[in-house]
Amino acid sequence: MKNGKLIILSAPSGSGKSTIINAILTRGLPLKFSISATSRPPRGEEKDGVEYYFHTPDEFRKRISNNDFLEYEEVYPDRFYGTLRSEVEKDLKEGNNVILDVDVAGGLNMKKIYGNQALLVFIQPPSIEALKERLEKRGTDLPQVIEDRISKASYEMSLAPRYDRVVINDDLEKAIIHTELIISNFIK
């Protein structure tokens, strides 16, 4: 059996990558979503093992010391995100094409590990101002958290040229179609 491929989508928070991934997963491409781990609390109706594997910061640190992650990032103090090595390796060995929603730095780290077996797609907001507006409309974060996300977004957008492909999400349906085409060509 042939190993699967990795499709890694990264973007500043609020750029629409989760919406794009969810839409693509309904369109029939042979993809399996890899659930990330995080130390942040669930938002809204999120469930453990569905949107994320939720851990306390201490549990997350223990898993880091056990080398359980392909990549992880402490995005903010005690706010970790990571990709579980066991989940991804199992899926790839079974021949599944795995799509991941990964922090920008984490995506670059995974590309180093998987090389041409991985495709990096950066979902870019049309502007920092549009991104701030989206985060405020989402209504899930406090103003200081939004400001932290905006300052991080500028840095993350500076890394976009290191990705294999960049999709500007100024029209959601066009961004979904463009991303789907990029992935389809990669996994053929």
Image (tube, helix red, strand yellow):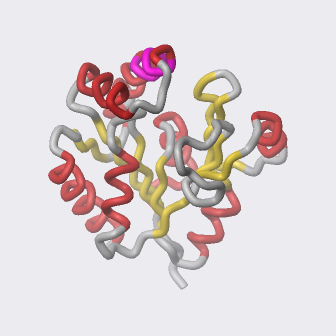
Residue 183 visible, this orientation: yes
Q: Is residue 107 above or below residue 176?
A: above
Q: Is residue 58 above or below residue 100?
A: above
Residue drawn at (61%, 39%) of the image: 81
Q: Quadrant of the C terminus?
A: bottom left
Dividing the picture into quadrants, the one containing residue 89 is: bottom right
Residue drawn at (38%, 29%) of the image: 159
- Residue 72 pos. (x, y %): 64, 40
Residue 12 visible, this orientation: no
In the foreground, 91 or 171: 171
| Relative to 73, 173 lies left or right | left
Q: Count the marks: how many?
A: 0
- Residue 129 pos. (x, y %): 25, 20
Q: Is residue 73 magenta?
A: no
Dividing the picture into quadrants, the one containing residue 51 is: bottom right
Q: Magenta part of the protein: which range?
A: 145-150
- Residue 11 pos. (x, y %): 39, 37
Q: Is residue 149 magenta?
A: yes
Residue drawn at (36%, 28%) of the image: 135
Secondary structure mostly taken by the magenta-highlighted segment of the chain:
helix
Q: Quadrant of the N terminus?
A: bottom right
Residue drawn at (60%, 74%) of the image: 93
- Residue 105 pos. (x, y %): 51, 34
| Relative to 6, 91 lies left or right | right
In the foreground, 170 or 108: 170
| Relative to 174, 167 lies left or right | right
